[in-house]
Amino acid sequence: MAARRSLESKDSDHQRRERRIILSMIVITSFINPFLGGSINIALPAISEDFSLGAVGMSWVAMSFILTSAVFLVPLGKLADIRGRKTTFLWGNVIIAITSVMCALAPSGSMLIFFRALQGAGSAMVFGTGVAIITSVYPAGERGRAIGISVTAVYIGLSLAPFLGGILTQYLGWRSIFYATIPFELLVIGITWLGISDEWADARGETFDLRGSILYLLSMSAFMYGFSRLPGTWAILLTAAGLTGLVLFTLLELRTKSPVFNIALFTRNRLFAFSNLAALINYATTFAITFLLSLYLQYIAGLSPRDAGIILVTQPLTMALVASYSGKLSDRYDPRILASAGMGITVGGLIMMSFLYTDTPLSYLIFSLVVVGLGFGMFSSPNTNAIMGSVSKKYLGVASATVGTMRLTGQMISMGIATLVLQLFIGNNPLSTEVSDEFLASMKITLIIFAALCTLGVFASLARGRKSQ
């Protein structure tokens, strides 16, 4: 009996050690991916100067990464369920490392955009499996804390991206941003390959739905690209075509034996469906805040880019501080209540921001950012824990990919709404102090729209039902 207890203790120690290794690797990638997505924005002027890129070209250096990440998440998440999540996670990091070298060596703007698109696909492989692996290895009583730590790493990456990206760009050039990520990727690749022995493929043996995957990729691409370019005529047509394609995709998946995305997760799983809807609304109402406030601080308040960046760090920093603790609380209390309360707080922060004027004290803005950060941090980890805890193990990869898709799609919708309202008030005129009244009016309308949508999100969050047992 003593020998048996000793063996069980060793097995338990081994499991705990491997869990720590896995969480460490996922934390690193949870930091690197948003850092790659956010830090490049601060370097766009320098990239434009090197490659003579216009405004559209500059936007696609950033947008190509987000677009491919979003459209590949669901198909690659399903493929990970079939082929193995560790293998997919490993190869995703290999792709990110290789494309980081290629981006750093890119001889032209078009090649940089191409390599950034490939990098987004690698990011989808990592984000589509990270949370699923955490859910696979951590028991229900510890899962929320682990997810909270992972989400905190995302927010830290978002927080430090403008600051570190600015320093690297100023002193070492924009290419150094990509070089700086390579050692971390090599560390993750090495430890994942040598230090993680388990593999997770709970849908092994199922047929991969190639037809549905192609239809999904084309439809999501058309929708997201079109929405990002509203209100142009071609943008409206592409958005409509994308939505039509997604409807056809839904009908196709309902008749497919082994669908790339099990629509029944939405039609038969109330907790999963409304938790994802809440996530989509939450990101759609918060992502463009940084975009709007960066313009407000520099064009209206007259701050330098550095000082504006320091103020804007307030929101993601607050998120990072709150997310880990709220994830831990969601192991003990109903995530529905925590997430819904978080969205309610976010509504309050959005309403506060809608009262910004030319002479509003910066202390008021900083407090508003703290409120939004508190709400977002309270929402994100418990909501993700609810989603991942609502599905069986064979769907963890798809569930993780769905969380990422809601995030990225919500971000695109958020930017689309903000851009559309700006176009209606300012048109194609360059932003300057001469149109400050029009800008303030457009920002107010956008924030009111966000607050109204976020209020609906509170009801969607509450409608999910109680915590799954």
Image (tube, rainbow, N blue to C red):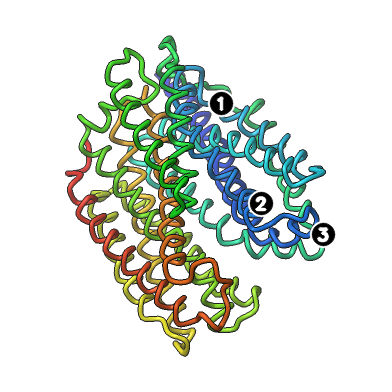
Which residue lies under the disc numbered 2?
57
User: Which residue sits at x=46%, y=26%?
Assistant: 75
Q: Are marks 3 and 1 in contact (CB under 8 Å)?
A: no
- Mark 1 residue type: Thr
Q: Considering only order in the chain, which callout, 3 or 2, is on the residue closer to the N terminus?
A: 2
Q: Which mark is residue 88?
A: 1
Q: Is residue 59 left or right of residue 317?
A: right
Q: Is residue 122 above or below residue 27?
A: above
SS at mark 3 in the image: helix
User: Which residue sits at x=41%, y=81%?
Assistant: 356
Query: In whole angstroms, how far apart are the C-alphas of marks 3 and 1?
Result: 33 Å
Task: Look at the image and tell me in which quarter the C terminus lies.
Answer: top left
Front tag of 2 and 3: 2
Image location of residue 281, percent across then percent down: 33, 52
User: Which residue sits at x=43%, y=25%?
Assistant: 215
Q: Nearer the viewer, residue 349 or 360?
A: 360
Quadrant of residue 48 within the rendered picture: bottom right
Q: Nearer the viewer, residue 289 or 15?
A: 289
Q: Residues within 10 Å of mark 1 (few under 14, many from 20)?
A: many
User: Which residue sits at x=41%, y=12%?
Assistant: 206
Quadrant of residue 271 within the rendered picture: top left
Q: Which mark is residue 172?
A: 3
SS at mark 1 in the image: helix
